[in-house]
Image (cartoon, grey):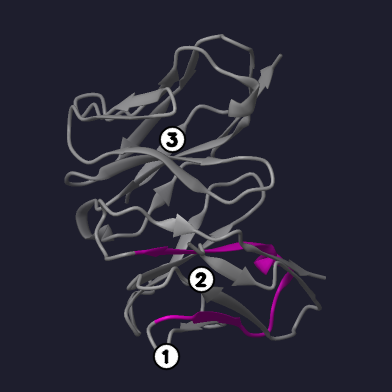
């Protein structure tokens, strides 16, 4: 079946540090890939997405590139801020017979120190 | 505009009781999804509605779980004979139209605790 594997957290960084959160997936066909973010006390919200191989999703300084050859969708940001502290979820949908439902990874908690 | 809303925000119930969780999707959204998130885990799919019908209920764990969407808008997730293992945050999401490329907008969730 479809699955998403994320690096385990928590990840603790100082402000302005470079961020990478690894995400790899297993799926049939050509899924769409997503990063969702959950800020403290708030609901899940879409951060960025990519719908085909080699697409780059970007938003709020975050980027991720859909790499079919390595089945990866790593999240990066060049300079994190304290306000980026949150839990980040990698997800996929549209793989094989899975239809529109999202399959999520376990989440990676990021803490950014001033 | 208004986002996805869920009520109640918290529900504590005794083992064996029946509970109903409500979801109000964004107006005009035809697709509605239910997920369950256990502590320290990512959300897991339960059921998906397109309009009034359940297009995919493959994630419902057993026949104690049932969901309806009678008028194609509000949905209710119903859990019979609750068990302690049902304790989790139940999330609802809606999207304008079905399709893996369309954003799903999530509600704040209902935290269910079964004692």
The residue under label 2 is B61
Residue located beneath label 1 in the image: B70
Q: Which chain's residue wears label 2?
A: B
Task: Tell me which numbered mark, 1 or 2, is placed earlier along the sequence.
Answer: 2
Left or right for B13, reference A28 = right
Chain at numbered mark 3:
A
Residue numbers of the magenta segment: B73-95
Along the horizontal axis of the image, is B38 left or right of A70?
right
Q: Secondary structure at mark 1?
A: loop
Calculate the distance from the C-alpha at mark 1 to the C-alpha at mark 2: 22 Å
The image shows residue B31 at horizontal and vertical percentages of 34, 70
**Membership of B72 in magenta stretch:** no
Task: Report crowding for label 3: few under 14, some 14 to 19, many 20 or more residues within 10 A (C-alpha).
Answer: some
* Percent coordinates x, y for residue A24 in the rendering: 36, 31
Q: Which mark is residue A43?
A: none
Pointer 3: what residue? A5
Q: Quadrant of the rendered structure where residue A30 is?
A: top left
Question: Can residue B90 be seen from the camera position used here?
Answer: yes
Is B1 drawn above or below residue A75 in the view shown?
below
Residue mark closest to the camera, 1 vs 3: 1
Secondary structure state at the residue bearing disc 2: loop
Answer yes or no: are tags 1 and 3 on the same subunit: no
Q: CA distance from mark 3 to mark 2?
A: 22 Å
Q: Residue at x 64, y 44 (%)?
A: B40
* 1 and 3 marks in contact (CB < 8 Å): no
């Amino acid at each position: 079946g479809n699955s998403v594997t994320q690096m385990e957290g928590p990840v603790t960084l100082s402000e302005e540090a470079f961020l990478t959160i690894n995400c790899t997936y297993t799926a049939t066909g050509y899924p769409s890939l997503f990063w969702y973010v959950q800020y403290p006390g708030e609901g899940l919200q879409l951060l960025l997405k990519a719908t085909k191989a080699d697409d780059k999703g970007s938003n709020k300084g975050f980027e991720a590139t859909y790499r079919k050859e390595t089945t990866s969708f790593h999240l990066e940001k060049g300079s994190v801020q304290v306000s980026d502290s949150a839990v980040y979820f990698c997800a996929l949908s549209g793989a094989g017979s899975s239809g529109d439902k999202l399959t999520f990874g376990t989440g990676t908690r990021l803490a950014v120190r001033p | 505009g208004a986002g996805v809303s869920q009520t109640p925000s918290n529900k504590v119930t005794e083992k064996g009781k029946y509970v109903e969780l409500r979801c109000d999707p964004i107006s005009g959204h035809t697709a509605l999804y239910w997920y369950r998130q256990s502590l320290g885990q990512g959300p897991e799919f339960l059921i998906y509605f397109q309009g009034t019908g359940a297009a995919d209920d493959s994630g419902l764990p057993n026949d104690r779980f049932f969901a309806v969407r009678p008028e194609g808008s509000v949905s209710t997730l119903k859990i019979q004979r609750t068990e302690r293992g049902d304790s989790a945050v139940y999330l609802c999401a809606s999207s304008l139209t079905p399709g893996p490329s369309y954003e799903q907008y999530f509600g704040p969730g209902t935290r269910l605790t079964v004692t």
